[in-house]
Amino acid sequence: MLITESLFYDMKKSFLLLYFLMIALITFSQTQQEQQIISLSKKKFEWMVAMNFDSLTPMLDERMIFIHSNGWPETKTEFINDIKSGKLRYTAIEVLESSARIYPESAVVIGRGKFNVTLEGKDLVFELKYTEFYTRKNGKWLLASRHANRLQ
């Protein structure tokens, strides 16, 4: 009887160890994916400030909707054209907080940041809370939607 109990106890310990190891691996994997999408979101902001259209344009979904903190919606084409024309110029963006949730073919980034912009020649500074929705197409993450709200 003692050998059977000992064997059962060892099997139970092994199962629990395997279970927790699997949970740790899944958690680590999700963290890597979350960090990847957070990094992409931050790069997008860098490209907006640098006016790096060669990198920015391909990471925007063709049907993207970009809703600014004043409720102004823009399509991908409108957004890119307004930056190119100088109507909207991002002079600095500082990400203060950022987190991500990954789903099978999509991701959501929720963040807070300080945005320095020039809008039609007027310099403005906003602290914004934003939500970004990314979709994965052909193995690439594309920004499909962004919405921002002013905190000040």
Image (cartoon, helix red, strand yellow):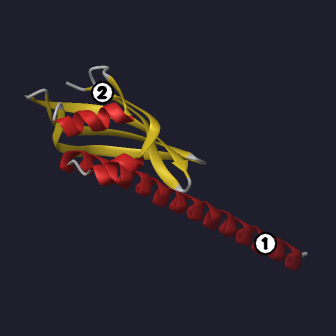
Question: Residue 38: x percent and y percent?
Answer: 38, 51
Q: Nearer the viewer, residue 64 or 17?
A: 64
User: Does residue 114 appear anywhere in the picture?
Assistant: no
Label 1 amino acid?
Met
- Gap between marks 2 and 1 measured at Cα: 57 Å
Residue ID at (30%, 21%): 72
Residue ID at (40%, 49%): 58
Question: Residue 17: x percent and y percent?
Answer: 66, 69
Residue where numbered disc 2 is placed: 68
Label 2 amino acid?
His
Q: Nearer the viewer, residue 105 or 102?
A: 105
Q: Secondary structure at mark 1?
A: helix
**Residue 31 versus residue 70 in the image, above or below:** below
Is residue 132 shown left or right of residue 13?
Answer: left
Residue where numbered disc 1 is placed: 11
Is residue 48 shown left or right of residue 3?
Answer: left
Q: Judge the density around disc 2: few (<14), some (14-19), many (≥20) Cα neighbours within 10 Å.
A: some
What residue occupies the far bottom of the structure in this picture? 3
- Say if mark 2 contacts mark 1, CB within 8 Å: no
**Residue 98 versus residue 24 in the image, above or below:** above
What residue occupies the far left of the structure in this picture? 122
Q: Nearer the viewer, residue 108 or 119?
A: 119
Residue ID at (61%, 60%): 23
Q: Secondary structure at mark 2?
A: loop
